Amino acid sequence: MEVLIREIEVSDYPEVVSLWINVLGNRKVNIDNFSVTLEKMNRDGNYKTFVALFENKVVGFISTVHALSIGDEFGYLHIQGLAVQEGLQNKGIGTKLLKYVEEYSKRKGISSIILCSGFKRTDAHAFYEHNGYDKDSYCFDKAL
């Protein structure tokens, strides 16, 4: 399966929004708030979103932010979202997206990647562990 990974383009937004909603279940995302937020993220420079293309169609994405950390001069990369179209999962696309950002991180001198995954997403947990990620902490959040 020939999959191309590249940075997101404006024409990709509808497909990526669909993945946020249909694969990740984030019903708060819509094309308007996604577009506004991604424009802000792109201006910041520390955020990167990459898409996976199969047969010239967006079939997956990974969204990241490079964050600073006390005691680590190069910081870490935080994966904010990763999704692959249903029906194309378990075909190596998610792994290609992970490997792509791992190589991107190495080129930037970043030595670690973190992510959070919901308790019920056990398939995702197995996927990350299969790709060498350790389950070593909990993520907490609080709505304000």
Image (tube, rainbow, N blue to C red):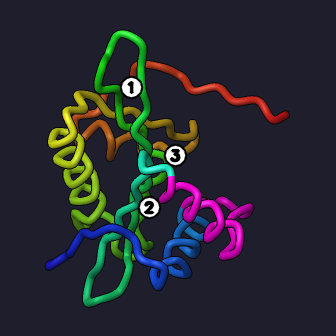
Q: Quadrant of residue 113?
A: top left
Tell me the distance, in whole angstroms, between the alpha carbons under discs 1 and 3. 13 Å
Residue found 52% across the figure and 77% down from its top? 13
Q: Quadrant of residue 118?
A: top right
Label drawn at residue 121: 3
Look at label 3 and name its amino acid: Arg
Q: Position of residue 50 (x, y in %)?
A: 35, 63
Label drawn at residue 135: 1
Label drawn at residue 83: 2
Q: Quadrant of residue 95?
A: bottom left
**Could you say whether the residue bearing mark 3 is in a helix, strand or loop?**
loop
With 77 as the anchor, is 137 left or right in this view? right
With 82 as the anchor, is 14 left or right in this view? right
Answer with mark 1 or mark 3, whichever residue precedes in sequence: 3
**Could you say whether the residue bearing mark 2 is in a helix, strand or loop?**
strand
**Could you say whether the residue bearing mark 1 is in a helix, strand or loop?**
loop
- Asked whether the residues under the numbered discs 1 and 3 touch, taking CB atoms below 8 Å apart as contact, a structural biologist would say no
* Quadrant location of the N terminus in the rendered image: bottom left
Look at label 2 and name its amino acid: Ala
Specify few, some or many for label 2: CA neighbours under 10 Å numbering under 14, 14-19, or 20 or more.
Answer: many
Tell me the distance, in whole angstroms, between the alpha carbons under discs 2 and 1. 19 Å
Q: Above or below — where is 69 with respect to 79?
A: above
Q: Which residues are magenta?
A: 24-43
Question: Is most of the magenta stretch helix, strand or loop?
Answer: helix
Q: Position of residue 18 (x, y in %)?
A: 57, 75
Residue found 48% across the figure and 79% down from its top? 10
Q: Above or below — where is 94 with respect to 46?
A: below
